[in-house]
Image: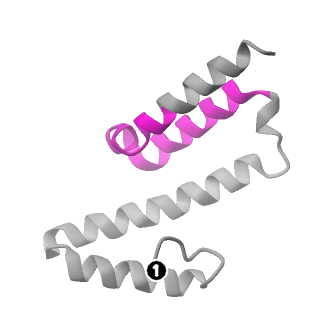
Amino acid sequence: MASATGEEDAAAIRAHVLATARAQLPPAELLRAVALYDRYLDYRAALHAAFAGAAPSRDPEAALALVERLQVELFGPEDAARLFAAGNALTAAAVAAAAVYR
């Protein structure tokens, strides 16, 4: 299943995630995986709240800075770097390229 958001409720999605984690991870890794999933859900909610009614395209540098701050706050600096560094670098490059045309 690539994405269940919008197709299933949050409890059903969580049940799928937990079942998959139990089936594929050793017990020692299970708690960390579930905690990471919970932080990801918190991150999505924080992004939604931060950008509700906002127009990030008006100040993409500030929007990226906010996203990166939330990543560090919710995942810690090490996990945030592991999870998001490559995507953030691509976004920063796109923002810089777009700035040329503003």
- Describe residue 72's horizontal placement relative to residue 67 as left or right: left
- Residue drawn at point x = 40 percent, y = 42 percent: 80
Q: Give the residue type that dot 1 points to.
A: Arg
Seen as rendered, the residue at the extreme top is: 100
Location of residue 27 in the rendering, given as x and y in whole percent from the top left corner:
15, 76
Give the left or right position of residue 58, taking residue 33 as reference: right
In the visual, does 34 lie left or right of 69? left
Q: Which residue is mark 1?
A: 14
Read off the magenta span. Answer: 59-88
Up-down relation of residue 63 to residue 48 (above or below): above
Q: Is residue 55 above or below residue 59?
A: below
- Does 70 lie within the magenta span? yes
* Residue 51, image x, y percentages: 75, 47
**Residue at 56% across, 23% down:** 93
**Which of the image's four quarters has the N terminus?**
bottom left
Quarter holding residue 78: top left
* Front-most of residues 40 and 74: 40
